[in-house]
Amino acid sequence: MIWLVFAILTAFFESLKDVSSKHSLRSLDAYIVAWVANIFAVIFLIPLLLISGIPKIEPQFWIALFIGGSLNVISFTLYIRALKIADLSLTVPLVTLTPLFLLVTSPLIVHENPTVADAIGILLIVVGSYVLNLRERQHGYFAPLKALFRNRGSRFMLMVAFIWSITSNFDKVGVVHSSPLFWSTALYSYLAVGMFPIAWFNSRHKFNQILPNLKPLMIIGLFHAIAITFQMIAVTYTLVTQVIAVKRMSALISVLFGYFLFHERGLEERLTGAAIMVSGVIVITLF
């Protein structure tokens, strides 16, 4: 069961990455954070890659990197913007909606079709997303779902979940045709390079924020690198699906951090909603 320890550590540091990002975004530009944090993640990942060794790279890897990397540049930008403008406890649990969108993308890209367990898990995810905004029910039974689309940060995170339903398929292709650690390093390198023109176009007049804030930006990158490293260690002991299911516990941890660190309201319904959504992910991935 050592894989479970590493998978839980993955969830914990993934949540710490979100918390440190949310804290930095109070005073820093979102595009600066998205760009520089990826640079530091690569800096921390490269020594681990050199220790583990460079694997044989097959041609399909480069196609997956170009398509998945380009889409992830968009999703990471939206992810950071969502954290900046909305509550951590409301936005982060929405990434568990990715399996819902996978019902559409997986059959088209990798020809994987849903099962009965998928249907049950997706129902739990939809119920959980409803519970996240349960306080809105006083405005009508459909108000909690409408609130997801009214909140700008929630809309951004919904787009992230949809993009991840596409990129997760290319992640699989990239890992199979290289190695987990090499794929992670290459992907975050692509993100760091791809984020530069976006940061330059939108925030070049704020580049003076970087040097005085190297420490918090480095911490975000460090948590990012630690999370992905523990994830790669965990998958050497068990199935990838089991690790990802446990990793989604970061949604629950982020809800708690949002309440205790940022004094976000609605702990009861958001914790309950996140727990239901995570259970849906576990049903889908483990059964």
Image (spheres, rainbow, N blue to C red):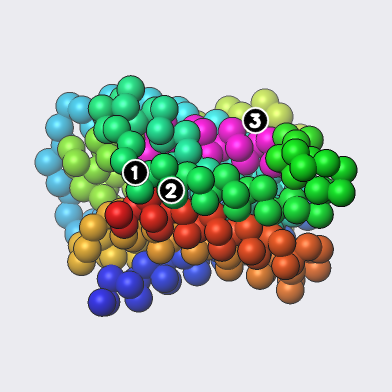
Q: Secondary structure at mark 2?
A: helix
- Residues at discs 1 and 3 in contact (Cβ within 8 Å): no
Residue 165 part of the magenta-drawn span: yes
Residue underneath mark 1: 116
Asked whether residue 80 appears in the rendered view, the answer is yes
Give the residue drawn at x 74%, y 73%.
Answer: 260
Instruction: Give the camera-side residue of 248 and 76.
Output: 248
Query: Which is nearer the N-term, disc 3 or disc 2?
Result: 2
Indicate the quadrant containing the C terminus: top left, top right, bottom left or bottom right: bottom left
Q: Is residue 206 left or right of residue 221?
A: right
| Mark 1 closeness class: few <14, some 14–19, many ≥20 residues within 10 Å | few
Tell me the quarter of the picture where residue 10 sits: bottom left
Query: Which is nearer the N-term, disc 1 or disc 3?
Result: 1
Separation of marks 1 and 3 at Cα, in angstroms: 47 Å
- Residues at discs 1 and 2 in contact (Cβ within 8 Å): yes
Residue underneath mark 3: 200
- Give the vertical position of 236 relative to 147 (above or below): below
Q: Is residue 63 left or right of residue 188?
A: left
The spot of residue 98 in percent (x, y) is 48, 41
Give the residue drawn at x 15%, y 46%.
Answer: 55
Q: Tag on residue 120?
A: 2
Amino acid beneath label 2 = Ile
Instruction: Give the camera-side residue of 153 and 279.
Output: 279
